[in-house]
Image (tube, grey):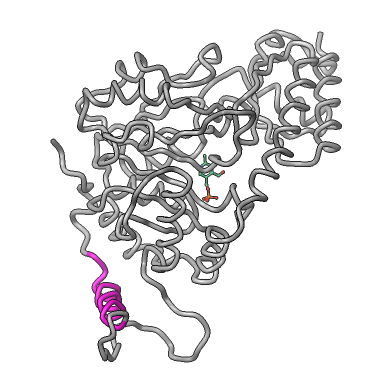
Amino acid sequence: MSSLQSAALARVKPSATLAVTARARELKREGRDVIGLGAGEPDFDTTKYTDVDGLPELKAAVAAKFARENGLKYETSQIHVAPGGKTVIYNALVATLSPGDEVIVPAPYWVSYPDMVLLAGGEPVTVIGHEADGFKLKPEALEAAITPRTKWLILNSPSNPTGAAYTGAELEALAAVLRRHPQVWVMTDDMYEHLIYGDFDYRTIAQAAPDLYDRTLTVNGVSKAYAMTGWRIGYAGGPKPLIDLMRKVAGQTTSNPSSISQWAAVEALNGPQDFIAERATHFEARRDLVVSMLNQATGVRCATPEGAFYVYPSIEGLIGKTTEGGTVIDGDDTFTAELLDAEGVAVVQGSAFGLSPYFRISYATSETVLEEACRRIQRFCASLR
Ligand SMILES: Cc1ncc(COP(=O)(O)O)c(C=O)c1O
């Protein structure tokens, strides 16, 4: 089996200055009288560097969150905190991908996955989750995509851009395939975990298939659940050897995320959680409004997703039609450009997410705005001949 560490990271030394500082900090915590002359850090008191991959208090809050909400047990040494979920994912890929290593990215995918894989020197392998299958990866398609060079499968549930979420049984079916391929690690991006509707029973894969725990990185963050996108705090729980490699990457690149943001995240994770479910009911009402209005637009077909704040309607019924200005709608790129031009509604073309002809709407805005936007989309679709 190939090594977990990427060839590039194997050539890199851990940051010596950060290692000394971390050791000194640890000894001080144990009560030792240590004089720290290691870090290049002004002694005037504002706020200071923290441990590279997160304050102990934040790691404890994250570990408690995983135990409380996902039934997953992680030691604080198995937690990685970084500037946003994005950096967490990137650190994991940079830490592990060597040239030729493949990463299975189910489409429609969040725009950054394939490009992050490329940046990290790996090869993205996209596998389509069709609309008829709720935009979800089927076990047969996963099996067919796996090769001896497959290093990761990336799961994102609920999904950006489709809102699709995997049931426990669907995750178990994927796990049955993964059991036959022990070289494949699983990165699950659970950013939208709390935006789930109706009585859907949310599961993350290490919970649905505990035997995969030793090769799963469970990624999450405060951006979407707590509406804290600007604070830039993401986190993950995973096997210690992987977490150690991710810390090595962070130690030579970002160092710690802002200490102020980390303390804010401690408060978010340890504080009252009831408003999360309350917010989800608002999002559910918005989803229902948008799905219903889009399905009333000529030529548009919009599935009802389980979660997140996105819908991914099909415009199959509009392909070949012509705008009032004479432009033929030959795909979702043209559709979204013409919609913006004619009605001033900005949506994202499906080609950006790896499945056409669709477009993505983010409904993380007020019902008044959504209603107006959907009315304009209806008017635009009705104007096509
Ligand atoms: C699926 C998914 N993962 C990760 C992120 C990034 O999260 P963060 O803002 O914490 O970097 C996003 C943000 O849009 C996302 O949609």
Estimate the x, y position of residue 3 in percent, counting from the top left.
Answer: 16, 43
Specify the quadrant that holds the N terminus: top left
The reply, left or right, for residue 206 in relation to residue 1 is right
Q: Nearer the viewer, residue 24 or 111?
A: 24
Q: Position of residue 301 (x, y in %)?
A: 69, 14
- For the C terminus, give its image quadrant: top right
Residue 90 placement (x, y as % from top left): 39, 48
Residue drawn at x 56%, y 66% as measured from the top left: 264
Name the foreground residue: 36 vs 360: 36
Seen as rendered, the residue at the extreme left is: 1
* Number of disc labels: 0
Observer-nearest of 271 and 309: 271
Magenta stretch mostly in which secondary structure? helix
Q: Nearer the viewer, residue 19 or 6?
A: 19
Q: Magenta stretch containing residue 328, yes or no?
A: no
Q: Residue at x 34, y 13 (%)?
A: 140
Task: Look at 53% across and 40% down and name the residue there.
Answer: 193
Q: Quadrant of residue 147?
A: top left
In the image, what residue occupies the spot 46% across and 34% down? 203
- Quarter location, residue 215: top left
Location of residue 354 in the rendering, given as x and y in whole percent from the top left corner? 51, 25
Residue 163's place in the image compared with 51, above or below, is above
Query: In the displayed structure, does residue 171 sit left or right of residue 264?
Result: left
| 245 shown above or below 202 | below
Q: Which contiguous range is marked in magenta?
A: 14-28
Q: Quadrant of residue 72?
A: top left
